[in-house]
Amino acid sequence: MINWHEDLPPIKPKYLAITQLVKRLIQEDKLLPGQRLPAERDLAKLLHVDRSTVTRAFMELTASGLLVKKTGSGTFISELPQVNSLTTKVNWNVFLENAGSSRDDTYQSKLLQARALDKGHLIDGAANELPMALIPQLGSLQMDWRSFLMAQKQEQDAGYQPLIHTISRLHTQRNQFKTTNQSLIITGGAQQSLLLILRSLLQMGDAVAFTSPSYFNSSAIFKTIGVKTYAVPTTPNGLDLDVLEDVILKHRIKLLILNPTFQNPTGRVMPLAERQRILHLCQSYQVAIIEDDVFGWLVPKEDVVPTFKSLAPENVIYISSLSKLLGSTTRLGWIVAPQAIGQRLLQVQKKLDIVPSMLAQVMAHLALSSDTFTAEITKLTAELATRREAVTAIFRQERPNWEFITPRGGFYLWVTQADPNIFNDLLANQILVKPGPIYGATKQSFRFNFAGMDASLQQVLTQKLQ
């Protein structure tokens, strides 16, 4: 009788130890051709390992021809196992199968295919950014080569100094916060900012929390870093603080990641009182907050709510970018953090060599310093409001059973209705939306980007929904 655990070779990784054990047992005729092996779950218990470890070992052995998987029957020793003539070629299928394909990938594939087949009648409400026609017109940003070489001399560890000063000035002018006694670091966008923060402050196995639904739900960054994530539901009254406190206590949450202004995907703006309650709770348990504020540019003056950063400068790390304003290919963002944290972020950024392009920084500085910048933002905000009102009117008229709250800004409408197949139903009618499961919600919900809906597309949308 085989004593699986005691016979397992003392080597790592464990899946290699399992493959060696099976090969040896075949050579010693302790496992015979055609013999059925224990089920993966049962063998994992016998070996005191995770089932995934046994699964990978079986995949290796199957690719080598030693094992045969029979659907519904189990895993068997091959009828002609050739232990001594095994190939030394790497089994790349192991990596491909481990990577797998997620439900999000399936949705994205369908969206990409629909765009590729577009013949001019597509309503792309699944877009993430502004249409080209709405990108602010900032004129010609002229710069000669000598000026660029001179600009490079103004680059410091945190980034291009004129750009840092311009961003700091804009935050002050917009009454968002002051960067006094804070570090402002230029990055390659909001996602890179988040990656840098997680790599700098957390260790593998640490835990973070964010709201649900949220676009953070589909981010691959957390898995890449090895960080555990916990979603906290949003109720009609806001973030469920009882659940948040329970999650903080049970899972030792290190960071709470929030997108409080025109939240993606719901478009919700978190009111001041709710922000203050969240801050109080996080301060009580020493949980730091990351404030993702990529839509902060698009808040009408009458709707401005103090940022988390302004309410508690030393407890909050602030992230923003230009992607929602100047296009997703801009790939330029920044972090505003307490000085001690800023120094740590700079060390890691330099070590990882993820400093953004100097050319992109100079161009961004020219754009933000343009005489027409403020006027163009005001114009953009007004046009988005016009399109938002038009699309919500169409939805209310043609789909009165769709439930949504009209946001005061941003790009997105978050719709809930009864049909769990709504994504495919709309897709069949050439209307693209981002389905709820991508954001950790149900199939009855979806996100619709109204920014691209000009007058002509509004007519097409109406016709398709009739």
Image (spheres, rainbow, N blue to C red):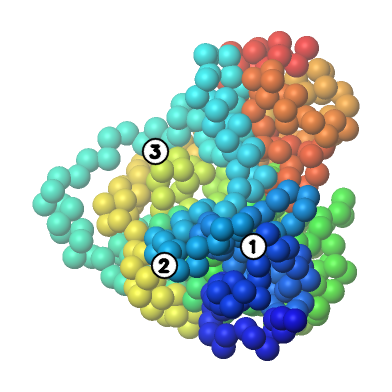
Q: Nearer the viewer, mark 2 or mark 3?
A: 2
Q: Which residue is mark 1?
A: 33
Q: Earlier in the sequence, mark 3 or mark 1?
A: 1
Q: Earlier in the sequence, mark 2 or mark 3?
A: 2
Q: Residue 264: x, y in percent?
A: 66, 48
Q: CA distance from mark 2 to mark 3?
A: 25 Å
Q: Are marks 1 and 2 in contact (CB under 8 Å)?
A: no
Left/right placement of residue 336 relative to residue 160 reads: right
- Image quadrant for the C terminus? top right
Q: Residues within 10 Å of mark 2 (few under 14, many from 20)?
A: many
Q: Which residue is mark 3?
A: 372
- Image quadrant for the N terminus? bottom right
- Residue 439 drawn above or below residue 66: above
Which quadrant would residue 209 be assigned to in this image? Answer: bottom right
Q: Residue at x 75, y 24 (%)?
A: 425
Q: Which residue is mark 2?
A: 185
Which quadrant would residue 28 be assigned to in this image? Answer: bottom right
Q: Nearer the viewer, mark 3 or mark 1?
A: 1
